[in-house]
Amino acid sequence: MDTGLFEQLHAEGQIDDAELAEIKLKSNGPVSVHWDLRTLLYLGILLLTSGLGIFIYKNLDAIGHVTIVAAVGILCVASFVYCFKHAAPYSNHEVESPNLWFDYVLLMGCLLLLTFIGYLQYQFHVFGTQWGLATFVPMLALFYCAYYFDNKGIQAMAVTNLAAWMGIAVQPKSVQFTEQFANDTTLWSAIALGVVLHIFSYVSVGMNIKAHFAFIYKNFGIHLLFVALLAAMFRYEHFYFLWFLVVAAVAAFHLWDAKREQVFYFFAVAALYGYIALSTVVVHLLFFADRTGGSSEAMVYLALLYFIASAIVLITFLIGYNKTFGQNDSI
């Protein structure tokens, strides 16, 4: 690495002698391409499976359904044969991958499994009219693979499949408001699943069974639960304040729990969702005051002042607590 720029910064007094010496020392060492290779491998698997799907779609008539199912099935079986052959023995604790390729072959096998089962149901109706089995069966397989092969990526896929089986659309990092929460059954299912995922998280740690899986469960669960509760505030408008109290209680619990575990990420998430719920109540009260004879212009100004002042308070609050977490934050 060319250190000319750093030497110029040193001459200008921007960096001291110790920093320049450390830069020169590191510039002579090897450069890690670990994450570059992992990114390329993940991208390759995704492109391969996506390309396979596009190829099948465009050449369906020419290839034939049986040939497609057989080809996907053979690739899927080959992937799992490789994984079972090279996998380390099962352990309740974290297990390192046996080699660089293992996780990517496992990912390909699981993606092909989803394609295989979905195609069988769509084309051949192997589960009859029980469409829920088309998500339930691969969900069980994904959970088994996640635990047996100790893979958090497959665990996230399994949780997403669990949500799909319950009729809830879940994204890996968060859950967004959609029209699905206008349905009572789906809304209550989302609340129940959010609670269940929290239970999975605490059981994983408490029983020391794949304790490192707890973060995935909790991350899905906290977003799903908060979004469902906020949706309930809007859906059951006449009881919105009772739902606000529930959101406030859940947020208070997560703030306490995040401080106990020293994880600032969950602390910030709970604070942000709590702020959204509080802001909903404030806006609702302002609109109520407007309807009962208040000045509309005054209500608008009050709302603007509230959001400006509350945003400053929230940012100050998070910055202040972030300093108390410090190096203990595990995220």
Image (cartoon, grey):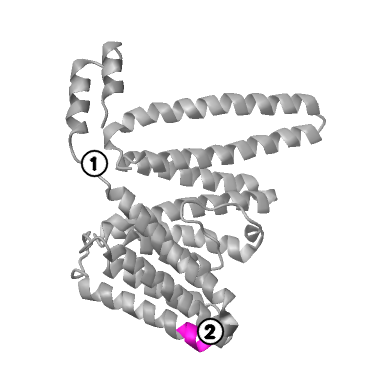
Going by the image, does 317 lie left or right of 233? left
Q: Is residue 17 visible?
A: yes
Q: Residue 241 location in percent, x, y?
A: 62, 44
- Other residues around mark 1 within 10 Å, as few (<14) / some (14–19) / many (≥20): few
Give the amino acid type for the residue marked by disc 1 in the picture. Answer: Val
Query: Which residue is identified by label 2?
Result: 63
Q: Which residues are the magenta region?
A: 64-69
Image quadrant in which you'd find residue 103: bottom left
94 part of magenta stretch: no
Residue at 61% x, 36% y: name it: 279
Residue 22 versus residue 205: which sits nearer the camera?
A: 22
Task: State the separation of the CA atoms marked 2 and 1.
Answer: 46 Å
Residue at 49% x, 74% y: name it: 135
In the displayed structure, would residue 181 be above or below residue 17?
A: below
Query: Which residue is identified by label 1?
Result: 31
> Which numbered marker is on residue 255?
none
Residue lying at the far top of the rendered structure: 12
